[in-house]
Amino acid sequence: MKALSFVLSLLLIAVSQLRADTFPATLAGGYQALLYYGSESTGTPAGILKLTVTTTGSFTGSLVTAEYKTYALPAGKFTYTAATDTAEVVGGLLIKRTGVGVTNLTLTLSLANATQVLSVVLSGDTGVYSSPGVAMDAISTTGFRNLTLAPKTTADFAGKYTLAMTQAAAAVAGTPGGSGYAVISVSTTGLMTFTGKAGDGTALTASLTPGPGRNYLLFLNPNLRASSYIAGKLNLTARPDSGFHIVPAATGVDLQWAKAAKTTDVSYRSGIANTGLLVTMEPWKTVPTVPVGQTLGSFLGLDLDKVFNLNFTGDFNTTTYAVRIPTKLGLTKLNQFRIAAGMAGSPSPILDTLWAGYFTLNVAPTTGLMTGSLKIEDSVPSTILGRPATIVKRTITISGVMLQLPAGGGASFAHGQLSIPPLRALTETTKTSAFHFDGPVTVDPLIAATAGTAGTYTTIVDLLDNGGLVYPTGIPANGANVTLVISPDLKSLTFNGRKLPLAADSRPVGLIYADTVSPVKLAITLYLNLATGNVTSGATNYVQPVVSGYSVSLRQGSNTFPRSGTFVIKK
């Protein structure tokens, strides 16, 4: 009887296998799903699942979880049911885990043939993997089959992009204020290479496989620890002109960002609570070779005479360092940002040599990546009575990306972060703040005003009496005709054949040029017409040290112009 019973069992199994529905070959391929605790719309990221399914329904795969672990899935096979047009893993998969106080996980998988949507439920744990102290499943109902291109076709969204990750809500004190960013390359197969920084300065790298709708799933753990992630969905949509982009979510957020605390972190050691991020991603087009002579600035509509606003948000107190903080920028032919205006007390914008000691920023024309620095100083009082304060110099690192927005985009066209070293290294850590470029893009009023001032002038000078002393070498004689040439950018003056750099810009009243290096020192003050900007008058001051033996004497002399009854004439 036992032998007969065994044979009957085998027959029943064979019959059931014969009756099993054939697994559709159309379901074969790669799949991915981003899991959230409780709800995909309101939950926090729990992990990412990746599968490779064969034409017979067997599969291999991996599960990366928010506990900073990667599990290779045990061997499994989907069973297809024609009546429901779905394939499931009967009984689910057991994910074995080790460690004190943790339990195994159960993974339930389902594939819908018509839509090729992957649904996932991960359950069975109440420890670090779920919400603290609460048993909660991790789910996904929107997993998808990876993009499969037809033969001899390429992804229509391939190319270079720049991406900004701004915080959905204003950062509170003591939390990262910087905007994250990435430089992106999408291959002809749709594979996305993602390189950038999180808002706290942590490096980010990823290689993402596309879904069928120009969509990607992001689940990164840049801090390499449990309960730490930058995760969410990146969905490209058509731009109003051509190509594709990502616009920030109108409601909710695009990505979520969190970091668990660690006492040895360079910044934000107490951790980062779950923070919502909004994503902007735009194509980055390089400057065309035709027509010849285009620059990145002209290609972007930021010609040499154009300026825009530089704004800062976050903990960084710009008022404290106002004399070094620019508020408007322009873009040069060399892809360097020039200062067009600064905060109260800062140098004139045309004193670029002085500004270069404070602020530098460049953009790579092939990628849109921006890098630079801002140098600041603080006076720190001494803790010892009678000792002077200490001047602490710090260099803030600036980084971010520009965005080539569609016409009429109207939003910020660059985002990035300031990485600010601690003032007191023993008790403080690095922190970040954000910056962004905003319109309107306008003609630089200072450049517009230079046209009235720059050019060639002639005048007759008077030589002031110096009491019969010897005049310095090269000073124009009384009644001499002198030519003045002011460069188009006002940064240099050639007076009577001698070239001097700009020393001070007091427009609209005047300009001062000075040469303090040559043996005969010379300073020239020019006074301007308040309406036209033309030079109306001026004065020179020559100083020549003369060494004789062990003594040093000074020869001094001055001119004024124009001579009474004459004018400074512009050619």
Image: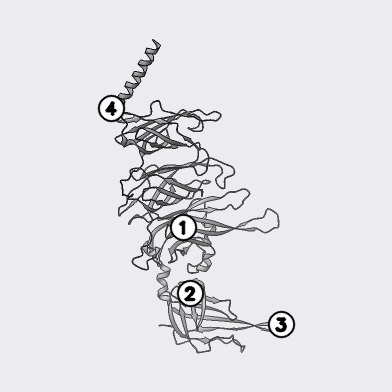
Task: Verify CB contact (< 8 Å) between mark 2 and mark 4.
Answer: no
Say which mark, if any, is on residue 550.
3
Q: Is residue 567 above or below residue 492?
A: below
Of the two numbered discs 1 and 2 on the same chain, state the one appearing first in sequence.
1
Q: Is residue 262 left or right of residue 387?
A: left
Question: Is disc 3 placed on a helix, strand or loop?
Answer: loop
Residue type at mark 3: give it.
Tyr
Give how far apart the Cα atoms at labels 1 and 2 are: 35 Å
Which quarter of the image is occupied by the C terminus?
bottom left
Give how far apart the Cα atoms at labels 4 and 3 are: 111 Å
Give how far apart the Cα atoms at labels 1 and 4 are: 56 Å
Residue at 31 percent across and 47 percent down: it is 151
Image location (x, y in percent) of residue 248? 38, 47
Q: Name the residue tied to disc 2.
A: 510
Tell which of 455 and 179 is nearer to you: 179
Q: Name the residue tied to disc 4.
A: 83
Q: How packed is label 2: few (under 14 Cα within 10 Å), some, or many (20 or more)?
A: many
